[in-house]
Image (cartoon, helix red, strand yellow):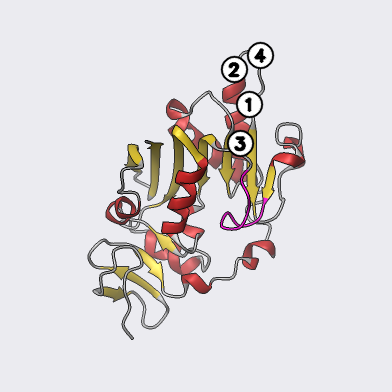
């Protein structure tokens, strides 16, 4: 079976555990599943992913701290794969402290509506875009686009890049928190989470987002294996 890296196309890939479907590209160090394009998104529709987890809110506060200095005060903003809305609540509080005479316009995307009811007032029904980003219609372009622990779940990273450059305003920003393929925990994250389809190294991420549509303002690897990225739409 001839297996190629879905990012750089190289054929020199390492079978991490014999015939378990998870591979590392020896050229760009990307981690991937060979059956990613066949993954059934109904997995998420059958699970309340992170919903009402008391620890998740604290994680979101931590992630927000990494991005705070880069977030535009202009609206609208959207989080893709927003889970229960905790991160968006931090964005709302931050923008409300600075936006005079206006309310931050936040949009929420999820495969099903699992928004915590306490956020109904800041994200009304008409701003909830439910479904895969590959199929939904976005009502506008956005100043801030957030992908918090979600990039590793998408089937086709190149399609995600195309969607992001379409929905992000010129000089708008994309914020990404995901796993680091070169960290010791990354392989465990692939095998413990069947829904993780791609985990990026610096090289593989730069390959997907290497064109002239983006400036990379931040690409930082934390000691605990997380990757924090801020892109600006050119």
What whole-number distance in Å separates the C-alpha atoms at marks 3 and 4? 20 Å
What whole-number distance in Å separates the C-alpha atoms at marks 1 and 2? 7 Å
Residues at circles 1 and 4 in contact by the CB criterion of under 8 Å:
no
The label on residue 4 is: none
Residues at circles 1 and 2 in contact by the CB criterion of under 8 Å:
yes
Look at mark 4 in the image and give the residue it sits on. 101
Image height check: is 190 above or below 108? Answer: below
Image height check: is 147 above or below 234? Answer: below
What whole-number distance in Å separates the C-alpha atoms at marks 3 and 2? 16 Å
Magenta part of the protein: which range?
Answer: 130-138
* Element marked by disc 4: loop
What whole-number distance in Å separates the C-alpha atoms at marks 1 and 4? 10 Å
Residue at 47% in and 70% down: 36
Q: Outermost residue, bottom direction?
A: 1
Q: Nearer the viewer, mark 3 or mark 2?
A: 2
Instruction: Answer whether residue 131 is magenta in the image.
Output: yes
**Would you call the spot at circle 1 few (<14 residues within 10 Å), some (14-19), or many (20 or more)?**
many
What whole-number distance in Å separates the C-alpha atoms at marks 1 and 3? 10 Å
- Give coordinates of residue 64: x percent, y percent: 50, 34
- Give coordinates of residue 135: x percent, y percent: 61, 58
Q: Nearer the viewer, residue 12 or 128?
A: 128
Q: Nearer the viewer, mark 3 or mark 4?
A: 4
Look at mark 3 in the image and give the residue it sits on. 88
Residues at circles 3 and 4 in contact by the CB criterion of under 8 Å:
no
Residues at circles 2 and 4 in contact by the CB criterion of under 8 Å:
yes
The label on residue 99 is: 2
Residue at 36% in and 67% down: 6
The label on residue 104 is: 1
**Would you call the spot at circle 2 few (<14 residues within 10 Å), some (14-19), or many (20 or more)?**
few
């Amino acid at each position: 079976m001839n297996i190629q890296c879905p990012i750089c196309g190289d054929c020199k890939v390492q079978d991490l555990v014999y015939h378990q479907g998870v591979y590392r590209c020896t050229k760009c160090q990307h981690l991937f599943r060979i059956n990613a394009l066949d993954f059934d998104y109904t997995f998420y529709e059958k699970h309340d992913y992170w919903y009402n987890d008391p620890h998740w809110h604290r994680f979101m506060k931590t992630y927000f701290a990494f991005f705070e200095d880069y977030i535009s005060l202009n609206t609208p903003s959207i989080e893709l794969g927003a889970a229960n809305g905790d991160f968006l609540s931090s964005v709302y509080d931050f923008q409300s402290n600075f936006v005079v005479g206006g309310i931050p316009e936040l949009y929420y995307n999820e495969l099903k509506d699992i928004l915590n009811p306490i956020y109904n007032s800041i994200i009304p029904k008409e701003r909830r875009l439910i479904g895969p980003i590959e199929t939904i219609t976005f009502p506008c372009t956005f100043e801030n686009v957030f992908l918090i622990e979600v990039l590793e779940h998408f089937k086709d990273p190149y399609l995600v890049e195309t969607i992001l450059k379409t929905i992000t305003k010129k000089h708008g920003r994309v914020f990404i928190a995901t796993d680091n393929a070169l960290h010791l925990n990354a392989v465990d994250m692939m095998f413990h989470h069947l829904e993780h389809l791609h985990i990026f190294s610096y090289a593989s991420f730069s390959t997907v987002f290497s064109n002239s549509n983006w400036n990379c303002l931040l690409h930082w690897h934390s000691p605990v294996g997380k990757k924090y990225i801020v892109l600006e739409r050119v």
